[in-house]
Image (spheres, helix red, strand yellow):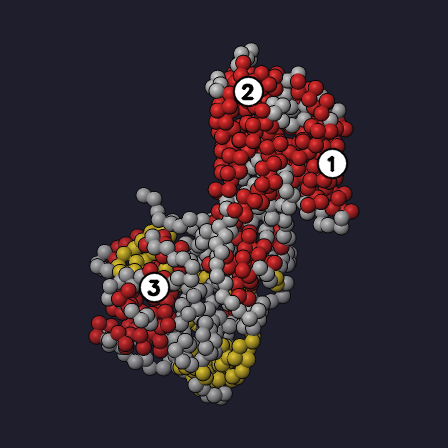
Amino acid sequence: MTLRTFVGGVLPRDGKDLTSEKPIKFVLPGKELVYPLLQHDGSQAVPYVAVGDKVLTGQLIAGGDGFFSSCIYASVSGQVSVIGERRMADGEMIAAIVVENDGLYDEITYQTMPPPEEMTEAEIHERIRDAGIVGLGGSKIPTHVKLSLENPEQIAFLIINGIECEPYLTADLRILLEESERIISGINVLLRLFPYAHGIISITDDKEEAITKLMGLVEREAKINVRVLKTKYPQGSERQLVFSVTGRKLTGMMSPPDVGCLVLNVETILNISRAVIEGRNLMSRIITVSGDALCEPQNLSVRLGTSYQTLIDEAGGLIDEKDGSDGKKGKNREVKMIAGGPMRGEIIVAVDTPVTKETAGFLCLYKDEEADVEAACIKCRKCISVCPERLQPLRLATLAEKGDRKSFLAYDGMCCNGCGCCSYICPAKRHITQRIKAFMKGIT
Amino acid sequence: MKLPMTASQAPHIRAPKSTAGIMTAVIIALLPAAGFGIYYFGLNALYLILATVATAVIAEYLACLIGKKKVTTGDYSAVVTGLILALCLPPDMPIWIGVAGAAFAILVVKIPFGGLGRNIVNPAAAARCFLLLSFAPMMIARQNTVLATSILTAGEEGDIAVSLLDLIFGHLGGMIGETSMLALAAGVVFLVLLGVVDLRIPGVYILSFLGFIVLFTKNTDPVYLVAHLIGGGLLLGAFFMATDFVTRPLSVAGQLIYGLLLGFLTAVFRFYGSGMEGVVFAIIIVNFLTPLIDKCISGYRPQKVKNDET
């Protein structure tokens, strides 16, 4: 059987073998937890606590400001020590609440939820919103915003994104394996909101164990299917995924609901399930901490606000910082730290910064010396053949460099989804994606 | 954190393939043809190849130094240019002519336009034209003795005293690297398997060329047609000059038109012209048309851009 897929894309070395067999492990945070008030697209949350206040694990410490915003909960018990600007992983300064961890992890008493069948649609919407859930697959949009459609009847496919096409990352795979029951119940909750929708769990053919497990579980479910897709990057990118699953094409500035689809990441679904059925709020993320520079890569369940340094320590530290077995010091190679996957993730400039709702992964890779030297474009056409949006990246990059906005738009430059395939494949190591993305930022 | 940290923008990983890797693959693909030429024609062919390649590399190195540019000999593109040029020289050519050709390719056709990636025509093809025009007696005198070329000029008569096998294995006169269809094919198969080139341009080129030749001559004798493929460097030109990334169009449709134009012009030059060097002239002319083809078939969709203040 040929697997459904999209045109273009690349097959980078996936590095998933480092962590794919490792069960999710819980990590205790350090002394200080930092909760930035903005952890998604939209407007900043408003603090509900003051310096010196005692907080409990699971307590609401900042509320969403308006509709396009999200609540923030304390992930430890302790005392609020500072409310002010803090440096984030990408170097930006953002207002944050800092909580001194007392190490007791006293929890609030959670309200018991009625069974989801007895809740009204409005109640489910409200619960998802109150739980502070945002798109955990990288969309950064508060989930209640994504779910609030004018016309919920238009959704025919609720696509659960279990693709995880980014190299190294295995957190979604572990969730599918370890939390598959919660995923199914989460989908059932959402299907209540979209009466005509069919739930489709999409997964790539390299995740055999998870496919078998899910296939067994969905046998009892009338409205949920598993759809196996070809392993390729960027299969998990929203537009490509919608096309691979349904054959419906998204052009221009269309979003999935325009073709009757709604795409949600598995971790988002997991948290929706926890929020609606168990009354829990978003306080932790499941993060793959991996990369060739780490001693023991792991899949970790991390409380939000934990510093990246804790994650490095939990993964056994950096290889080059340890003494070698022959007693010699490590090689002191330059390390590149990335929040997210290696194709789309953002660089981390300081490790004493917190994990947020946006953190989709944490990688420590060695610097790639060759990739720093740009050579001349030889028009080999590789970028064109891998572009999943069927654009002409080499031309867009040139236009971006020139600042030719009109031509950039005429060549559909705004359709770039920033997947990075062109830069990845370029034999001259040109920074194609980087140029296009920077130029797009200037336009919008 | 004691280790030095580094920053970059996504994507943070790159495919292992590099420009130098692609060029190395092309060089390896050309080696069977070069080896056969040396074996068949003798040591002068070897000296000519070495001198031409060395000249191309040294010329590029010096030009970069003098122009205060980053030295780009590390991408091996100069080696490819020198090697392709050497393969389309007569085996008993004086070495200094090969040197002059290589210097022309780099110093006139490639570097002044901005080096690799910016040259308008294929340097090797242009240098071959340059040698043909400047040293016509030497190139032509030697070519006239060449069996394959005489078949070409024989035109419609069709009585050829040579077997198909000889043509395929290359047991006949000609330029150093152009005689053995088998050696060239081995290189092409290697490149196609590696995914460096595809057969779109050479396929359309060769098929349309054969089509136009049959149309012009009404001669469908297979030996005659194979002689057309082997004599005068059609294969080398189609697979190694016309597929040059830099000088071919980008779009698939553009590449098909490019191949078709090449086939047509080569057939015209072969049939109506002097009958020898149709290939390089066709390549150069169509190279000049590439920017036009790219502009016409570009995927450019004029859009109304909202009027803004800037």
Residue B211 at x, y percent in the picture: 48, 27
What element does badge 3 sit on? helix
What element does badge 2 sit on? helix
Query: Of the residues shown, which amino acid type is indicated by label 1?
Result: Ala
Pick whichever, A282 or B243, lies toward us: B243
How crowded is the residue under tag 1: few (<14 C-alpha within 10 Å), some, or many (20+)?
A: many
The reply to whether the C-beta atoms of the residues labelled 2 and 1 are less than 8 Å apart is no
Residue A104 at x, y percent in the picture: 43, 80
* Residue A16 shows up from this direction: no
User: Which residue is disc 3 drawn over?
Assistant: A257
Question: Left or right: A202 with respect to A339?
Answer: left
In which quarter of the view is residue B26 placed?
A: top right
Query: Of the residues shown, which amino acid type is indicated by label 3?
Result: Pro
Pick whichever, A30 or B45, lies toward us: B45
User: Which residue is disc 2 drawn over?
Assistant: B227
Query: Of the residues shown, which amino acid type is indicated by label 2?
Result: Ala
Mark 2 or 3: in front is 2
Mark 2 or 1: in front is 2
Q: Are marks 1 and 3 on the same chain?
A: no
Residue at (57% x, 69% y) in the render? B310
Q: Of label 2 and label 1, which has the lower sequence position?
A: 1
Q: CA distance from mark 2 to mark 1?
A: 31 Å
Protein chain holding label 3: A
Q: Are marks 2 and 3 on the same chain?
A: no
Residue at (76% x, 50% y) in the render? B68
Protein chain holding label 2: B
User: Which residue is disc 1 drawn over?
Assistant: B103
Residue A391 at x, y percent in the picture: 48, 52
